Image (spheres, grey):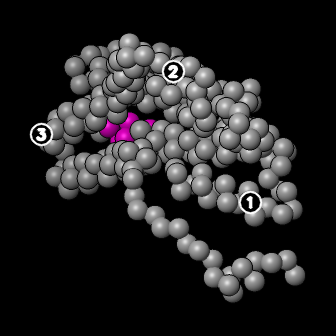
Amino acid sequence: MARLTLSFDRELELDENKAFNKEFYDKCIERHLESEGKLNQSIRSLVMVNTVMFLVLNGQDWTIPFANIQVSTIPAIQEILLFYSSMAFFFLCSVFVTKQCYDGIIDQCGNRIVNSGKVDPDFYNAASKHFEFFLKLYRPKLNIWGIDFFEHGWGFATFSLMINLILLAVILVIPAVHVALVVVTSMQIFQSDWNEYAKLLLIGSVALINFGGLAMIFGMNKDFDFYEIEPTANQEKESLPK
């Protein structure tokens, strides 16, 4: 994420034709709203399918409304739910990463528009996109772009740490519950009379899909090593307008 935002900041410096203007900023806001809608839909889908899978695991049976079909009569219902749940989780992770990328681009534009060296751009960006103000409210440093106007004491420092730990735990509940359901369902399928090769293929695919989703989420903020490349004289010459 740091590489993305810093690279876009360099692109803003190179933009001699002013393509990254206010119109571009507004278009990014529109795409951000689309990604936010997709994220909410993905969360609902994942919660729904995981709820159904949990009920099936515990032997609950009911009739699907309008279709008048009992869940227990659907062949390989656990296998279907396991695969669908894994795909829903993977797409949730990909949509979440995309939304974070739009957040980073919009933030960098806002930084330039309001001059983040003097003004906190979070307040400006909050007027254009939905901003989770509770994340800003409870962090130790209110303005991460510049100086704070108020210094906090040890009481708020302790409270901020506690709130942030709780928020982190709540956020981790979604992948933790999902992974637990996937593991339990996979164990039941592995002990079933299903074809051995089919079981191994399904469980292997499910493991790969879920690992890919988790890797995208936790790798997004991983501190990898990147080295700044200084352009050579030839590259600078080639970049000049002809």
From mark 3 to mark 1, how far is it between C-alphas?
Answer: 59 Å
Residue depicted at 61% across the width and 23% down the height? 149
Amino acid type for the residue under numbered disc 2: Glu
Which disc is residue 242 wearing?
A: none
Q: Quadrant of residue 190?
A: top left
Sequence-wise, the earlier of marks 3 and 1 is: 1
- Say which of marks 2 and 3 sits in front: 2
Residue 137 seen in render: yes
Question: Mark 2 falls on what kind of element?
Answer: loop
Sequence-wise, the earlier of marks 2 and 3 is: 2
Amino acid type for the residue under numbered disc 1: Glu
Residue under pointer 1? 13
Residue under pointer 3? 191
- Say which of marks 2 and 1 sits in front: 2
Amino acid type for the residue under numbered disc 3: Gln
- Say which of marks 3 and 1 sits in front: 1
**Mark 1, other Cα within 10 Å: few <14 / some 14–19 / many ≥20:** few
Which disc is residue 151 wearing?
A: 2
**Mark 3, other Cα within 10 Å: few <14 / some 14–19 / many ≥20:** few
Compared to residue 115, the image places residue 58 above or below, namely above
How far across and down, in percent of the image, does residue 136 sit? 54, 25
Residue depicted at 51% across the width and 17% down the height? 66
From mark 2 to mark 3, how far is it between C-alphas?
Answer: 59 Å
142 vs 106, nearest the viewer: 142
How far across and down, in percent of the image, does residue 52 sit? 36, 23
Q: Which residues are magenta?
A: 82-88
180 vs 205, nearest the viewer: 180
